[in-house]
Amino acid sequence: MDLNKLRKEIDAIDNEILKLLNKRMKIVKKVGEIKNSSNTPIYRPEREKAIIERLCGLSKRENGILQKEHIEAIFLEIFAISRTLERQERVAFLGPVGTYTHQAAEHKFGANARYLPLLNIEAVFKAVHNKEAKYGVIPIENNTEGVVGITLDSLKKYDVKIVSEICLDIHHSFASLQDDLSKIKRIYSHPQGYNQCLNFLETHGLLDIEFIPTESTAKAAKLASKDELSGAICSKIAAKLYNVPLLFEKIEDNLANRTRFIIISDFKTQKSGNDKTSVIAKTPHKTGALFDLLKKFKDRNINLLKIESRPNKDDTFNTWFYIDFEGHIDDKKVSEVIKEENMIWLGSYIKEC
């Protein structure tokens, strides 16, 4: 087999791919002009999902080598570049750069988006609410630590909508300028990251040394890069960003550790046929009130996915409920139960988690 010949074939195919991509992007710019004239949202997750499903089916029918994850990786970046050409929109996320939230944001919006890293979750909500950013990316729950309370509280407080969700496998690493663990005097980490790696810390005699909590695992890596007697529990991307050597790559107790992120914006997504709806519900302070609420879902054959109670944060001990369930606001039975119970609709979006 002639290697040079094969390389020439690849070069010829690459040339054709580039021509087709340029052709696609010219059409994308025309689509952007139409959307801009009507102020239509650029991000259409249901449309992107339909394209990927169609292409996966085509690849399967033609016995293609590319699997779903390969097609997604290629076309999510194409979609991200397309959105940039249609309209430059800012994406706020829980920063700093190098966090898992940054990774989630890039997963949806690509490396070339206009990013706005912010130092706390509520700041992301404020940025979207005040139109300083079109989209916001924030964590909402982890399968080890549970829900992120400030995210639920901010959903109640700010007039934004959930338009998409992302589920990412989270792998914590241990990074340090010091290769002798016995000389490490302190560990930087976000509290959630720290708590998810207790077995590793105990096994390596690091559980009893000083723990310094940080706003993010990326901040932990940044601090460790300036402290030779410290270590950081952080992501690989953060360790690389701040040039802190990795001593251990995967240290979390639960190797199935996953975090669910949500994307917030100011519009309603269209039905995809596989949707999830999030709401806030309040019940009267009386016996059986929660039972009566849940029965409304059962009577309509609506499958509940999650229910979390949150305090009112006033001088009472009353609570409100964050609820996820299957369906879309445009489904009759969903709109009926929301209206009947006077719920606050937080968004309907493609179910990915």
Image (cartoon, rainbow, N blue to C red):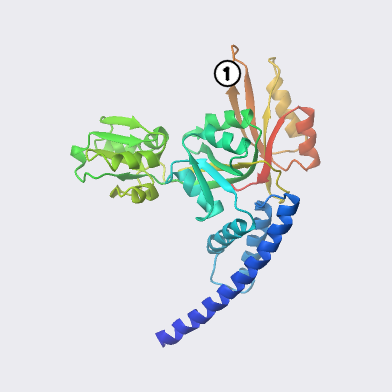
Residue located 38% across and 44% down the image:
172
Q: Is residue 220 above or below residue 42?
A: above
Residue 226, given in percent of the width and then of the height, sits at 27, 41
Disc 1, SS? loop
Residue located 48% across and 46% down the image:
102
The answer to whether residue 216 is visible is: yes
Q: Crowdedness of circle 1 by 10 Å Cα count: few (<14), some, many (20+)?
A: few
Residue 334, given in percent of the width and then of the height, sits at 76, 38
Q: Decide if residue 200 is on the left or right side of residue 196.
A: left
**Quarter of the rendering occupied by the N terminus:** bottom left
Q: Which one is nearer the viewer's eye here, 223 or 282? A: 223
Q: Quadrant of residue 4?
A: bottom left
Q: Decide if residue 239 is on the left or right side of residue 26.
A: left
Q: Which one is nearer the viewer's eye here, 208 or 263? A: 263
Residue 257, given in percent of the width and then of the height, sits at 45, 43
Q: Which one is nearer the viewer's eye here, 227 or 107? A: 227
Residue located 68% across and 66% down the image:
27
Q: Is residue 74 above or below residue 321?
A: below
Q: Quadrant of residue 62?
A: bottom right
Residue underneath mark 1 = 313
Please, what is the three-letter code of the amino acid marked with disc 1?
Lys
The answer to whether residue 200 is visible is: no
Q: Which one is nearer the viewer's eye here, 237 or 174? A: 237
Residue 305, given in percent of the width and then of the height, sits at 63, 38
Q: Is residue 14 above or below residue 256?
A: below
**Quarter of the rendering occupied by the C terminus:** top right
Q: In this view, does 58 lie above or below 267?
A: below
Residue located 31% across and 31% down the image:
211
Q: Quadrant of residue 276?
A: top right
